[in-house]
């Protein structure tokens, strides 16, 4: 999430999102500026970026003395949770593909440099490492498969719980 925002808008917007995640509740641009040390115009640009992504909500109140609007910003938790859920689904999908790959291949590793090859690659190279010439050894990937299966069922369980929470 933070990396995605940083890639899209740069480190200042990421910094403001980080601050909002820790802060909880409503804040003004001036408070964010003071507490992060970022210039006020930088903070404002970051807030608009996050608003554009649907990550923020604001409430505006007219200041009695100046007549100007004051904006109180807060995180849009529903949107944030939806994004986090979809990222988790993507991760789950990736892990399932990885599991499928591990279950349907045999692996050979180089004992010197740790390079890993599937059966067909190892065979093409006469079971020698194409990098250093060392004999490849068969790798039992049962542990890796167990790890992936456990991880997948953990994430599936999390998703079930969180989707139920969203539906209410
Ligand atoms: Zn090697």
Image (tube, grey):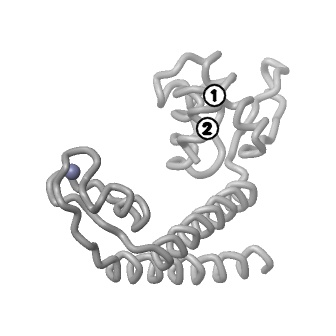
* Quadrant including the C terminus: bottom right
| Residue at 44% across, 82% down | 150
Q: Quadrant for residue 135, please give it.
A: bottom left
Residue 65 lies, with reference to residue 112, above or below; the image says above
The quarter of the picture where residue 43 lies is: top right
Foreground: 144 or 56? Answer: 144
What residue sits right under mark 2 in the picture?
5
150 horizontally vs 79: left or right:
left
Mark 2, other Cα within 10 Å: few <14 / some 14–19 / many ≥20: some
**SS label for mark 2:** helix
Q: What element carries label 1?
A: helix
Above or below, comparing residue 44 to residue 26 in the picture: above
| Residue depicted at x 73% and y 43% | 56
The residue that disc 1 covers is 9
Residue at 56% from the left image edge and 31% from the top image edge = 32
Q: Are marks 1 and 2 in contact (CB under 8 Å)?
A: yes
């Amino acid at each position: 999430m933070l990396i995605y925002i940083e890639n899209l808008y740069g480190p200042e917007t990421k910094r403001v999102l980080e601050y909002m995640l820790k802060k909880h509740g409503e804040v003004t641009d001036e408070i964010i500026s003071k507490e992060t040390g970022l210039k006020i115009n930088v903070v404002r640009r970051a807030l608009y970026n996050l608003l554009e992504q649907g990550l923020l909500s604001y409430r505006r109140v007219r200041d009695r003395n100046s007549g100007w609007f004051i904006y109180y910003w807060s995180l849009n938790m529903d949107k944030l949770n939806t994004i986090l859920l979809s990222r988790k689904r993507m991760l789950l999908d990736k892990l399932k593909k990885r599991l499928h790959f591990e279950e349907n291949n045999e692996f050979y590793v180089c004992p010197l440099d740790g390079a890993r090859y599937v059966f067909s690659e190892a065979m093409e190279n006469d079971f020698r490492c194409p990098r250093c010439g060392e004999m490849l050894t068969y790798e039992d990937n049962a542990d890796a498969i167990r790890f992936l299966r456990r991880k997948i069922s953990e994430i599936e369980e999390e998703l079930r719980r969180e989707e139920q929470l969203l539906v209410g």
